Image: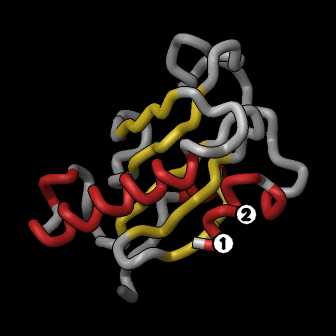
Amino acid sequence: MTDFAVDPVIAGLTHKLADWPLCRVFLYDDSRYPWGLLVPRRPGAIEMCDLAAADQQQLMAEIVKLSGLIRPLPGVGKLNVGNLGNMVPQLHVHVIGRYKGDPAWPGPVWGHSDPVRWTDPAAAPLAQVVSKS
């Protein structure tokens, strides 16, 4: 899609990992969590209901795929999957690996504290597994 663009806020907080059939896959720039974002490459999509039925199904498949890559990463005991969009309206889905004792546990990660940026995003465990998927 030539008119697809990632919201500048998302672009500034993430590192691109891959393009899957529907979504661009990103690593969130906080090394404390294995945190991925899926952004459907559909211009103007704000809510899941804005997608065609086939794209809705594909989005769910990609959420499950990313969840399956994050869940076996070291320390992950729980997955948080969320589509909030209160700060950035562009449709995007967070998939976050959580563990007891992580900095925000058991509360939400959003707004908990300043992120600890990746020094080498390509070496992040999530980046490694996505590159092999």
Residue for point 39% across, 88% down: 2
Q: Are marks 2 and 1 in contact (CB under 8 Å)?
A: yes
Residue farthest left in this picture: 53
Q: Amino acid at mark 2?
A: Gln
Q: Looking at the picture, does residue 51 appear above or below residue 116?
A: below
Which residue is under mark 2?
A: 128
The quadrant of the rendering that contains the C terminus is bottom right
Q: Residues within 10 Å of mark 1 (few under 14, many from 20)?
A: few
What residue is rendered at 10% in x and 66% in y?
53
Give the colour scheme of this rendering.
secondary structure
Residue 28 position, x and y percent, is: 63, 47
Q: Residues within 10 Å of mark 2 (few under 14, many from 20)?
A: some
Residue type at mark 1 is Ser
Distance from the alpha carbon under mark 2 to that under mark 1: 5 Å
Q: Position of residue 44 (x, y in %)?
A: 26, 65
Whether 28 is drawn above or below 131: the answer is above
Q: Please state if 115 lies on the left or on the right of 106 as rendered.
A: right
Secondary structure beneath label 2: helix
Q: Which residue is mark 1?
A: 131
